Image (tube, grey):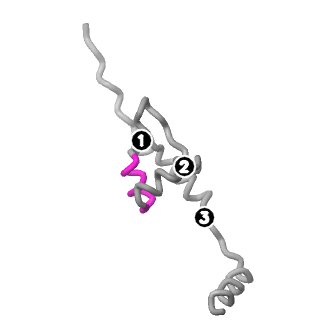
Amino acid sequence: MQTNPAPQPSSTRDTLLTRPEAAAFLNVALRTVDALIATGDLPFVRLRRAIRFRPAAIQMFIEASECRRNPRTARKLNRAARA
């Protein structure tokens, strides 16, 4: 009986990342990734006890977290910081 080898990911977009790899991808501490998991802000995949992340989901998290500051708000913040 011949067994087939395990399928390999077709590209890096199919590869799941570990917690340390996700932290490196986001350029944050592992504790920050754990906090994002705990709050439900960072989507993850659970494989039994292992937690993995899809790179595409992390990228969507980054895009959803992007901030654009209103110029008026920026001036108010600068004035408040000087006071």
Q: Residue furthest bottom?
A: 83
Cβ–Cβ under 8 Å for marks 2 and 3: no
Question: Is residue 41 highlighted in magenta?
Answer: no
What is the tally of numbered marks visible in this picture?
A: 3
Give me the residue at 51% from left, 53% from top: 35
**Of 14 and 20, the residue lying toward us:** 20
Q: Amino acid at mark 2?
A: Leu
Q: Quarter-wise, where is residue 49 in the image?
A: top left
Relative image position of residue 48 (x, y in whole percent): 43, 29
Q: Point out the image quarter for the N terminus.
A: top left
Q: Amino acid at mark 3?
A: Glu
Q: Closer to the N terminus: mark 2 or mark 3?
A: 2
Q: Quarter-wise, where is residue 26 in the image?
A: bottom left
Relative image position of residue 18 (x, y in whole percent): 38, 45
Q: Quarter-wise, where is residue 50 in the image?
A: top left
**Of 6 and 20, the residue lying toward us:** 20
Relative image position of residue 77 (x, y in whole percent): 67, 83
> According to the image, label 3 marks what residue?
66
Q: Closer to the N terminus: mark 1 or mark 2?
A: 1
> According to the image, label 1 marks what residue?
16
* Residues in magenta, as a range: 19-28
The secondary element bearing badge 1 is classed as loop
Instruction: Mark 1: give few (<14), some (14-19) or many (20+) Cα within 10 Å.
Output: some
Q: Is residue 68 above or below residue 37?
A: below
Label 1 vs label 2: CA separation? 14 Å
